Image (cartoon, grey):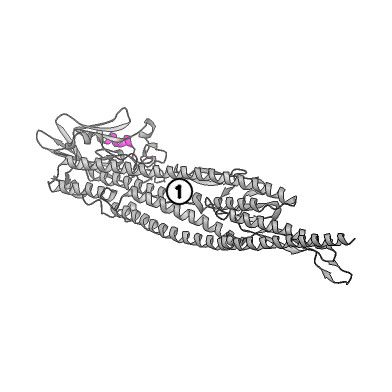
Amino acid sequence: MSLTNALHIGRTGLTASQIAIQVAGNNMANAATPGYSRQITRIAPLRAGTTSLQSSIGAGAQVTAVQRQMDSAIQARLWGATADDARQNALAGVYSQIESILGELGTNDLSSELSSFFSAWSERANQTRSSASVVQLGDQLANFVQRLRSDLVDQSRQSDRTLSAAVEGANSLIEQIAHLNGEISGAEISGQEANVLRDQRDQLITNLSAYMEVSVVDRGSQGVDVLVGSTPVVLGALARGVQVKRTVDADGNTHVGVETAAGQTELTVTSGQIGAAIASRDGTIENLIAKVDDIARQLIWQVNRLHSTGVAGNGFTNLAGATAFGTADRTLALNDSTNSAMVGLPGQPTNGGFVVRVRQNATGAMTTVRVDVDLDGITNAGTQGTDDDTSAESIRAQLNAIAGVSASFNAEGKLVVSADEGFTFSFEDDTSGALAALGVNSFFNGTDGASLAVRSDLKGDASKLAAGRYVNGQLVENGTALQLAQVQDAPLESLAGQSLAGLWRDAVQEVGGKSAGAASAASASTLVRESLESQRAAISGVSLDEESVNLLQYQRQYQASARLITVVDELTQVLIGLV
């Protein structure tokens, strides 16, 4: 081997050592950088030359690659765990907020309000509470239900805002990933290492997985494809993007989802912050709002059915219904599907009838007249149809034909029943529910939790509270109050045998169970994510101790290569001196 070859070997050693020292220094500088993968220097011997003795001697060293240390399988599992952890923690936060809104662990809750209202009826029946107190607690209950529903609607809107913000954040990351794909392809096609860019891209995908679950297909220097399910949101340097999709069902309820911005392909997102926002918004919150509305509707219907046939004092002189009928609806059967006045009512009347009791005040004489309500859906000819069934107008006509009573529709289209001078009237034994549907002598007005309210004139004059009722022709002064006191815990056919209190109790327990489950799942998912992060760090993380040892080794290698060059230089000088 000539001195020239020895000098070349020393030069390659210097070059390889310099590069290795730079890599070790870069590792140490990025020891705390999120998403950074440790890089290692691959050094290999140069192709050997041949001496005059035909023996192979090395030609020095060369750096063949600077590689990232990473395990793609662990990285993929980490992305999945990040999505699951983000979902579980987001759901746990939402359930905690819902529990705070419901407040069932304290005294300011719907269960307590329902109990107070129906207890007031019981106490009114026992003459220990006044009618004014019953009306006041009814108004308090109605206001509470309205506030509760409003708070739940606000929480649903907050989920909408969270979803929109998450989709916006995901879109930004998708665009950055696509941009980095282009940069990585350009760099690696030209032969440059793109380790830093790859680390940045992996970190962006990790951040994206916190919004929604993703899978990644690595196409090498052509970049990666990012998919949600089987639908790509990133194709190389092309960002397809995502956007919120809103649909309205037949009942007018709005549902949310996510779709690609390019092509509007619907995405099934179940994990990450986006999955949590969709699940909480269209799942728990909307179900709770529906339960509140169910309770409000049944509260309105059950209380009004009893109150409408109750009596205040010796009877009424004037009562106005709460349901407004347009001119065309008045002559349509109450069970006609095209009767818009009946749409959305808390309950629907059925085949039956009710009794009108008219009292002549001067003599105390009573007359009773039954008003038939035909809602069997069969015409007089025996065929299916509602043409001959009872309408609001036919009820008005039957009432108007009773001596001592007149009935008409006011300017708002509401039925008004009035007693003639010297007479009072009341209702009893309504087997059809028609009076409650018309809103005559109702306690509550409204159709759901948002509109639930005590009848306005009743709030102004509690003496109109119908606490009594006729039973077998005899006036029982507390008859209605006694029956209403039992409504809270009575099994209702319209609720599949559940009571009002039972329905809400089950709803609250369901939320409590989901909240506890979400908290437990959040804790478990966090442990899984942290474990995978530790596994990744063991492979890709930087150990300052290890890098310090490497740095010392490369320093010594550099010094040895420099010493070799010095020796060769000295030998060369000796050789020159001999010439």
Q: What quarter of the picture does the C terminus occupy? A: bottom right
Q: Which residues are magenta?
A: 382-398
Callout 1 secondary element: helix
Residue 408, by quadrant, is: top left
Q: Relative to the observer, which residue lies in front, 198 or 91?
A: 198
Other residues around mark 1 within 10 Å, as few (<14) / some (14–19) / many (≥20): some
- Which residue is at 74% across, 51% downward? 189
Q: Can residue 174 be seen?
A: yes
- The percent coordinates of residue 502 (x first, y second) are 30, 55
Question: Left of 407 or right of it: where is 266?
Answer: right
Count of marks overlaid on the render: 1
Query: What's the residue type where badge 1 is placed?
Result: Asp
Where is 62 relative to 225, above or below? below
Residue 312, by quadrant, is: top left
- Which residue is at 55% across, 59% downward? 78
The residue pinned by badge 1 equals: 282
- The percent coordinates of residue 383 (x first, y second) are 41, 46
- Which residue is at 16% across, 41% downward? 131
Question: Left of 184 or right of it: where is 387?
Answer: left
Report if residue 251 lies within the magenta region: no
Q: What quarter of the picture does the N terminus occupy? A: bottom right
Q: Relative to the observer, which residue lies in front, 193 or 378?
A: 193
